[in-house]
Image: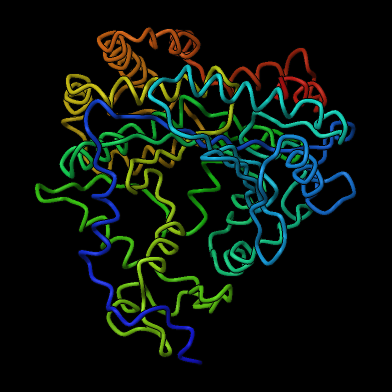
């Protein structure tokens, strides 16, 4: 391979990599929250997944929106794969799932206003193109065999490599909500990372919202969560075993040990397909290519734990749902992660738990959600406590953001999750009519 593909001659070090994470350290008065909001685009008339490639498809939809609202293209090999305007982006997941990533804000209200503004801008183009966006976690009508990958080179490499039996479902059919949270030091980052991992299966249960897939009841309340459990355990998963000296370097070690998919040089992808991991690349290079920090960033972004450590904390394990649930999710994490008393109460709540307890729960939650058992109690019992702790944290912050918890306080009081509401209607007044479901999850 030509040596010109090597970007630099400076050997990448662990310290260089660690600096990526420490660069996120912020002052306590500058803590913000961010959101990545994925939705499933469908053809309004048919309910089928909207295609990237059709005449009134997602590519043309993005082109029109960019023209009308003065957004710039994000491209891959000259193909439009997203849009950007300032710090905000609209990007496409492998099956044309459309993700809004908004500039982080100090208050949930500001994120809410920005999402509402963007939706208002999108409305006339939705109508023109006959497209609707679903607030739902898995494709309700069209399954992956009839959903083409968008023309982003990375996704085609991933589709060939990811070995889990539901990896195609994850890539082409699912939509989730992610939240991002800041930290003030390495110790603070690790503490928040630990707490977010503990909360992870409970939050998956509370926001489960993907029971109907391909027009039928799957038997799972979060089929999206099930698909992630069956994607690629080398780069997905859950953390719990935090020893006393757990820090950035131990998380980095997880990333280093994950098999590599490809290396990018000069817009060319050198496919690795798991032949080496990043630790081996770091030590020995690959075919005259030496690693640099951009290689690490790419590789780390191809690792998908339920909570991901970057120069912020990224929580990734929630089905897309109605907007009130999205803001409630952010409120729970903000109330807990940004309040020291709340984080201590969560640690106390889970002080007698083991990795085995959480591992078993992760596999129960996709089917049973809040009705799963954990340590001789239901998950819903724990959720009530989690919400109570978050509410106290938010109230102490005195921003009035505890109001965002009201919709899920009602869910917890009833012992249900969003999927339970859908299933009750599915077997009740909707009489398994998929059009009724589509109407419900479009609003």
Measuring from the top left, give residue 311's x and y in whole percent: 32, 47
Residue 350: which quarter of the image?
A: top left
Relative horizontal placement of residue 400, taking residue 171 as reference (left or right) = left
Q: Residue at horizontal 23%, vertical 50%?
A: 22
Residue at the left extreme of this rendering: 244
Observer-nearest residue: 4 or 435? Answer: 4
Measuring from the top left, give residue 43's x and y in whole percent: 84, 37
Q: Residue at horizontal 24%, vertical 58%?
A: 18
Looking at the rendered structure, the number of numbered marks drawn on it comes to 0
Observer-nearest residue: 257 or 248? Answer: 248
Q: Residue at horizontal 21%, vertical 24%?
A: 349
Q: Residue at horizontal 26%, vertical 55%?
A: 251
Query: Which quarter of the rendered picture does the C terminus lie within?
Result: top right
Q: Compared with residue 163, is residue 440 higher up or lower down, i.e. above or below?
A: above
Residue 220: which quarter of the image?
A: top right
Measuring from the top left, give residue 167's x and y in whole percent: 58, 56
Q: Compared with residue 309, is residue 32 higher up or lower down, i.e. above or below?
A: above
Relative horizontal placement of residue 223, taking residue 15 as reference (left or right) = right
Residue 100: which quarter of the image?
A: top right
Measuring from the top left, give residue 326's x and y in whole percent: 52, 24
Relative horizontal placement of residue 155, taking residue 236 as reference (left or right) = right
Q: Compared with residue 167, is residue 382 higher up or lower down, i.e. above or below?
A: above
- The colouring scheme, among rainbow, by chain, secondary structure or one colour, is rainbow
Q: Compared with residue 286, is residue 377 higher up or lower down, i.e. above or below?
A: above
């Amino acid at each position: 391979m030509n040596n010109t593909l090597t970007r630099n001659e400076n050997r990448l070090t662990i310290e260089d990599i660690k600096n990526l994470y420490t660069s996120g350290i912020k002052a306590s008065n500058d803590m913000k929250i961010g959101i990545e909001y994925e939705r499933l685009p469908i053809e309004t008339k048919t309910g089928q997944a909207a295609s990237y490639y059709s005449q009134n498809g997602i590519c043309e939809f993005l082109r029109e929106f960019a023209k009308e609202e003065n957004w710039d293209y994000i491209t891959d090999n000259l193909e439009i794969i997203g849009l950007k305007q300032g710090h905000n982006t609209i990007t496409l997941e492998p099956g044309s799932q459309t993700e809004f990533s908004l500039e982080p804000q100090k208050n949930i209200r500001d994120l809410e206003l920005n999402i509402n503004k963007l939706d208002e801008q999108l409305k006339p183009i939705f109508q023109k193109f006959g497209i609707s966006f679903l607030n739902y976690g898995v494709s309700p009508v069209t399954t992956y065999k009839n959903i083409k990958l968008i023309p982003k080179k990375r996704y085609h490499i991933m589709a060939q490599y990811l070995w889990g039996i539901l990896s195609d479902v994850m890539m082409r059919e699912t939509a989730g909500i992610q939240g991002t949270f800041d930290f003030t030091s390495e110790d603070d980052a690790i503490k928040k990372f630990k707490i977010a991992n503990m909360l992870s299966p409970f939050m998956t249960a509370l926001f489960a919202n993907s029971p109907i897939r391909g027009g039928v009841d799957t038997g799972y309340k979060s089929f999206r969560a099930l698909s992630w459990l069956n994607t690629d355990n080398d780069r997905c998963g859950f953390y719990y075993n935090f020893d006393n000296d757990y820090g950035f370097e131990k998380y980095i070690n997880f990333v280093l040990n994950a098999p590599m998919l490809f290396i990018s040089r000069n817009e060319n992808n050198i496919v690795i397909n798991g032949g080496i991991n990043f630790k081996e690349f770091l030590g020995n290079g690959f075919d005259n290519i030496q690693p640099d920090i951009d290689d690490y960033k790419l590789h780390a972004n191809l690792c998908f734990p339920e909570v991901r450590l970057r120069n912020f904390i990224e929580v990734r394990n929630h089905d897309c749902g109605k907007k009130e649930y999205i803001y409630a999710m952010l409120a729970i994490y903000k109330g807990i992660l940004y309040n020291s008393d709340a984080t201590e109460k969560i640690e106390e709540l889970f002080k007698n738990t083991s990795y085995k307890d959480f591992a078993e729960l992760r596999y129960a939650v996709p089917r049973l959600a809040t009705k799963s058992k954990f340590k001789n109690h239901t998950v819903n019992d724990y959720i009530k406590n989690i919400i109570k702790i978050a509410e106290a944290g938010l109230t102490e912050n005195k921003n009035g953001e505890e109001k965002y918890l009201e919709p899920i306080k009602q869910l917890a009081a009833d012992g249900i999750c969003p999927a339970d509401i859908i299933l009750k209607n599915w077997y009740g007044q909707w009489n398994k009519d998929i059009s009724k479901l589509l109407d419900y999850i479009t609003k």
